[in-house]
């Protein structure tokens, strides 16, 4: 941006729009969010520590982090596959598939939740196939994993797709000319270039899965120590009017989310830098 | 010319695996919603949809979206104008802060308003003294929904407005147009598709939000039940047909959202190609 552009432009409305933006942002987002930390700060350290290291709370953190992690891994692998197929190949129904990738963003989570619970229950369409082998999906951690995979599906596809689209195929030709096999070219030339985008998508899916509530509660069975996720535990504490407990757990979750936001911003910055560098 | 495509069988194998994955995770659940809703015939489906509690849930959902979406549109346009047309310090910080609601768990999004306005909340005693009810009432639902959908419009508009630059607006102003005239006649026509895109996504989330609304609603039938909450109640009461019938309304909303979204994407892609063709020629000529 040149010096001339930086000097005060002739366009009006900066004061009004930035003022409105800051007031609205503060009233609706910043002040309510800071209340959570203020309330947490009003607890004694011991109170806070006892609440968040309670066995049941720790168990729910474990369930949430593990299922979210595995779901994000699943999405990273299949997200790259779907993005690859959509960018590189032509097949009937491609436009439909491309459009439906965003279904998890558009479909209300409660609807997804009851649909998945009915499909994966023991006499559901898919659940009965697994039940024949003696495997349960709904009301186990696997059910949570399924719901979180559904909810995080669009993230990796939508972060990898544009990078793959802009990718210069000449580099692949060069690799092939130099004797690389197709798989070698993919693993050693294309994949490293996609990595920042994949990691961005992974982090977005993971962050979303950590906080997800609606699609999980129906399929998870909500058994403390086994299938109880953190957002559900916060909900349970609220229903028991244990506001301090809910607040303490929520503040830990919120710090984890903010950390994920930083990670995502970092990967996004890396993706953009790679793009700009070419 | 070196071959940079996979052998045919690899190609079809990859396509098949991708399609099976998508079918299993996306298409099957969608079909399940409709199949369960109509499993006992269309009569029972219609009966479930026409039930007074369902209708009042639909009304509340529409009302909530009718307040939240315009509020976030006004904010989104204002924020995009300030951020895209002017340079100032702390812009990146502001962008991150606007994204915050996306990073917050829906349950926590509801919780913060309970901490603020609930009976034990910071403003609870004052609200009680003035007989104002926010939590377990409609205002709380609207607040939580507005919080959750806060970034959608701004997020879509900022890159669109940045890409437009400000030459056209500056030309209009120097030719004597007022700020409002410039906005209505120049900026708005330029950003209309981006704006519509943001509105559609914002609306889908506003009508479908579950976790945040669940915390602040209190689940009072016919009073503070939005459609997603109504689906949950029916499902937990083992009224599966009725639950899925109500869910089809939301599933149709999702499908309409996806179709509109795809249409806008194709439309703007076409425009982009036209727009990009010009600078390409200029660049090549000057090189």
Image (tube, rainbow, N blue to C red):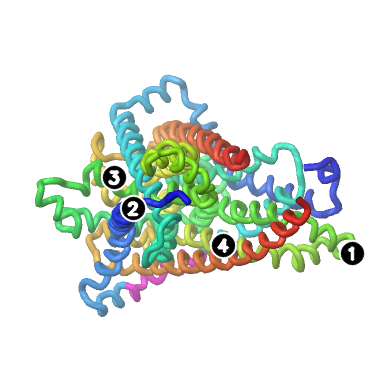
Looking at the picture, does residue A19 appear above or below residue B66?
A: above
Q: Residue furthest top?
A: A46
Q: Residues within 10 Å of mark 2 (few under 14, many from 20)?
A: few
- For the point 27% across and 64% down, which residue is it? B32
Q: Secondary structure at mark 4?
A: helix
Say which of A182 and B30 sits in front: A182
User: What is the x, y in percent for residue B114?
Assistant: 48, 44
Q: Nearer the N terminus, badge 2 or badge 1? A: 2
For disc 4, the marked residue is B197
Give how far apart the Cα atoms at labels 2 and 1 are. Answer: 61 Å
Q: Left or right: where does residue B114 sit relative to residue B75?
A: left
* Mark 1 or 4, nearer chain start: 1
Using the image, determine if residue B209 lies above or below residue A145: below
Q: Nearer the viewer, mark 4 or mark 2?
A: 2
Residue annotated with mark 1? B175
Which residues are the magenta region?
A: B49-63
How crowded pointer 1 is (Cα within 10 Å; few <14, some 14-19, many 20+) is rated as few
Look at mark 2 in the image and give the residue it sits on. B7
Report the quarter where the N terminus of chain A lies. top right
Q: How far separated are the C-alphas under marks 4 and 2?
A: 39 Å
Q: Nearer the viewer, mark 4 or mark 3?
A: 4
- Chain ID at mark 3: A
- Which residue occupies 55% across, 34% down? A266
């Amino acid at each position: 941006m040149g010096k001339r552009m930086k000097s005060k432009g002739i366009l009006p409305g900066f004061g009004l729009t930035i003022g409105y933006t800051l007031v609205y942002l503060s009233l609706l987002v910043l002040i309510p969010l800071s209340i959570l930390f203020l309330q947490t700060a009003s607890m004694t350290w011991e109170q806070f520590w006892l609440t968040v290291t309670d066995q049941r709370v720790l168990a729910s953190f474990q369930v949430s982090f593990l299922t979210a992690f595995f779901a994000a891994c699943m999405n990273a692998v299949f997200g790259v596959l779907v993005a690859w197929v959509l960018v590189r190949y032509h097949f009937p129904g491609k436009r439909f598939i491309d459009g439906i990738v965003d279904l998890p963003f558009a479909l209300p989570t409660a609807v997804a939740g009851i649909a998945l619970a009915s499909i994966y229950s023991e006499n559901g369409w898919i659940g009965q196939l697994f039940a024949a082998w003696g495997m349960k999906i709904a009301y186990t951690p696997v059910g949570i994993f399924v719901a979180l995979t559904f909810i995080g599906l669009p993230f990796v596809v939508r972060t990898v797709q544009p990078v793959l689209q802009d990718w210069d195929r000449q580099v692949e030709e060069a690799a092939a000319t130099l004797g690389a096999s197709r798989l070698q070219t993919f693993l050693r030339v294309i994949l490293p270039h996609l990595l920042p985008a994949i990691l961005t998508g992974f982090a977005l899916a993971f962050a979303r899965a950590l906080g997800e509530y609606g699609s999980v509660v129906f399929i998870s069975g909500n058994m403390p120590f086994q299938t109880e996720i953190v957002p559900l535990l916060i909900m349970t504490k609220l229903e028991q009017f244990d506001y301090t407990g809910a607040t303490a757990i929520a503040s830990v979750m919120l710090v984890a989310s903010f950390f994920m936001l930083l990670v995502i911003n970092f990967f996004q910055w890396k993706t953009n830098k790679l793009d700009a560098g070419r | 010319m070196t071959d940079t495509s996979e052998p045919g069988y690899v190609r079809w194998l990859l396509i098949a695996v991708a399609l099976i994955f998508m079918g299993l995770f996306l298409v099957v659940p969608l079909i399940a919603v409709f199949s369960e809703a109509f499993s006992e015939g269309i009569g029972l489906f219609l009966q479930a949809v026409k039930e007074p509690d369902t209708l009042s849930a639909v009304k509340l959902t529409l009302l909530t979206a009718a307040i939240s979406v315009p509020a976030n549109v006004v904010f989104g346009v204002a924020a995009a104008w300030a951020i895209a047309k002017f340079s100032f310090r702390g812009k990146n910080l502001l962008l991150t802060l606007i994204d915050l609601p996306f990073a917050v768990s829906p349950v926590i999004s509801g919780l913060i308003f309970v901490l603020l306005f609930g009976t034990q909340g910071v403003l609870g005693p004052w609200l009680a003294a003035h007989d104002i009810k926010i939590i377990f009432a409609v205002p709380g639902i609207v607040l939580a929904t507005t919080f959750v959908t806060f970034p959608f419009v701004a997020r879509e508009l900022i890159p669109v407005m940045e890409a437009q630059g400000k030459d056209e607006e500056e030309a209009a102003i120097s030719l004597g147009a007022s700020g409002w005239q410039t906005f209505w006649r120049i900026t708005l026509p330029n950003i209309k598709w981006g704006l519509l895109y943001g509105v559609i996504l914002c609306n889908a989330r506003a009508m479908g939000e579950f976790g945040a609304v669940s915390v602040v609603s209190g689940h009072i039938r016919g009073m503070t039940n939005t459609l997603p909450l109504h689906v949950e109640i029916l499902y937990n009461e083992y009224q599966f047909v009725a639950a899925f019938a109500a869910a089809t309304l939301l599933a149709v909303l999702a499908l309409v959202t996806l179709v509109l979204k795809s249409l806008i994407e194709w439309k703007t892609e076409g425009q982009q190609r036209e727009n990009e063709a010009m600078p390409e020629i200029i660049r090549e000529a000057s090189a």
